[in-house]
Image (cartoon, rainbow, N blue to C red):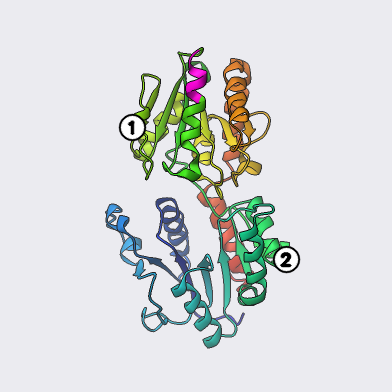
């Protein structure tokens, strides 16, 4: 890329989530030190925008757009970018902006940002990979994903391995910390996530109930909300809690011996990172994208989420673990999670930028 006095780097993101907000805010704070960088965030509008209640320069500079409309860079009062990070490839306004980028600036580079995980033999993904290779791959120069599962998928989508970067995600490492020793934790399994079919919460409750006849001292805590009505399942040993603030959620992670996520599919599952940072032993569905990075035999039990008996065996194995085994898991979870943080995400971001500019 020809070196310019100013480099325009834009990042489009669908329905800006809290964790992506804080990551991009950190990247922005670092790029502010580079006077020749103009960094902008464009996000589709969504109902939770008002919940941010942020009064800072970064938040005020976010450009909110309608996901059902198309825009030119002129419409957004922006110059054509030199480097464009595009989240996903299914959003009409994002695709239109990338098309305009290549038309107006042949030297511009476009990075596909994807948190999808590799799903072996899934027809939709196989067909999606074929479509992507034929119609979309040529416009993308690099890909940025959370970890190995996303990397495998991008290879299927036609990217060379050397053109795929990782460590896109991080939870709030200044909030989620391992503060409680195993012997002080409660005998409870903690689930955090949406109450939807894909999260497999109803099966989780059924299996826990079947076990709780002989293990009445154990509790199951479900934190979240969604379209499944789980209130009827409340008992002395099953507690249901609405979404909590990060600080309150961190306290729950630190109270619990086990974190459990039985999803039939989860691309990365940032809650696994949160639980790991807090030192929980992990009970995870084999279909979770972050397993390779955050789980091993020392700190986790992996099960088939579609098998009731497999989930049941996982509970039994977990309850039988000794304090010594749980102490090892506590340290291992924290260790594996520690390399996923904003600083390392920013380093990967800069590696991508430096592929084009060589000046940061």
* Residue 308, image x, y percentages: 58, 31
192, 85: nearer the viewer: 192
Instruction: Describe the element under mark 2 as helix, strand or loop.
Output: loop
Most foreground residue, 198 or 169: 198
As for residue 120 lying within the magenta part, the answer is: no
Q: Which residue is mark 2?
A: 160
Magenta residues span 208-213
Whichever of labels 1 and 2 marks the residue nearer the N terminus, that label is: 2
Q: Is residue 211 magenta?
A: yes
Residue drawn 37% across the image and 78% down it: 76
Residue at 51% across, 31% down: 259
Q: Residues within 10 Å of mark 1 (few under 14, many from 20)?
A: few
Kindly identify which residue carries mark 1: 231
Query: Within 10 angstroms of label 2, few (less than 14), some, or many (20 or more) residues?
Result: some
**Mark whose residue sits in front, 1 or 2:** 1
Q: Residue at left 63%, top 34%?
A: 303
Q: Secondary structure at mark 1?
A: helix
Q: Is residue 79 visible?
A: yes
What's the mark number on residue 35?
Answer: none
- Total marks in image: 2
For residue 114, which quarter of the picture? bottom right
Task: Identify whether 287 is placed above or below 12.
Answer: above
- Main SS, magenta region, reads helix
Distance from the alpha carbon under mark 1 to that under mark 2 = 48 Å
Q: Pick the quarter of the image with the N terminus.
A: bottom right
Instruction: List x then y, in percent, for residue 193.
Output: 44, 41
Q: Quadrant of residue 156?
A: bottom right
Residue at the image point whose x is 45% and y is 71% from the top:
35
Q: Quadrant of the C terminus?
A: bottom right
Q: In the figure, is residue 303 to the left or right of 188?
A: right
Residue 204 in the image, given as x and y percentages of width and height: 50, 31
């Amino acid at each position: 890329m020809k070196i310019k006095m100013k480099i325009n780097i834009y990042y489009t993101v669908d329905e800006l989530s809290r964790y992506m907000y804080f990551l991009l805010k950190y990247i922005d704070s670092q790029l502010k030190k580079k006077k020749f960088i103009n960094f902008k965030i464009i996000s589709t509008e969504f109902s939770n925008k008002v919940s941010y209640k942020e009064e800072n320069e970064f938040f005020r500079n976010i450009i909110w757009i309608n996901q059902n409309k198309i825009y030119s860079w002129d419409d957004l009062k922006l110059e054509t970018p030199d480097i464009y990070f595009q989240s996903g490839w299914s959003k009409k306004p994002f695709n239109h902006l990338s098309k305009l980028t290549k038309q107006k600036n042949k030297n511009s580079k476009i990075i596909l940002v994807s948190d999808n995980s590799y799903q072996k033999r899934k027809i939709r993904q196989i067909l999606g990979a074929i479509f992507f290779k034929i119609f979309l791959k040529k416009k993308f120069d690099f890909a940025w994903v959370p970890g190995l599962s996303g990397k495998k998928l991008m290879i299927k989508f036609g990217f060379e391995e050397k053109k795929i970067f990782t460590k896109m995600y991080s939870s709030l490492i200044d909030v989620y910390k391992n503060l409680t020793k195993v012997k002080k934790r409660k005998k409870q399994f903690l689930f955090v996530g949406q109450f939807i079919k894909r999260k497999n919460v109803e099966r989780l409750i059924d299996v826990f109930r079947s076990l709780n006849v002989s293990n009445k001292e154990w509790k199951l805590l479900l934190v979240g909300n969604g379209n499944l009505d789980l209130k009827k399942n409340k008992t002395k040993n099953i507690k249901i809690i609405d979404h909590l603030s990060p600080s309150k959620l961190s306290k729950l992670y630190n109270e619990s011996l086990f974190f459990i996520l039985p999803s039939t599919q989860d691309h990365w599952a940032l809650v696994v990172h949160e639980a790991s940072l807090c030192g929980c032993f992990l009970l995870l569905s084999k279909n979770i994208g972050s397993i390779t990075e955050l789980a091993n035999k020392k700190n986790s039990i992996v099960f088939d989420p579609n098998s009731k008996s497999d989930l049941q065996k996982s509970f039994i194995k977990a309850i039988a673990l000794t304090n010594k085994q749980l102490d090892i898991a506590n340290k291992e979870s924290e260790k594996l999670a520690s390399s996923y943080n904003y600083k390392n995400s920013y380093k990967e971001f800069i590696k991508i930028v430096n592929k084009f500019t060589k000046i940061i």
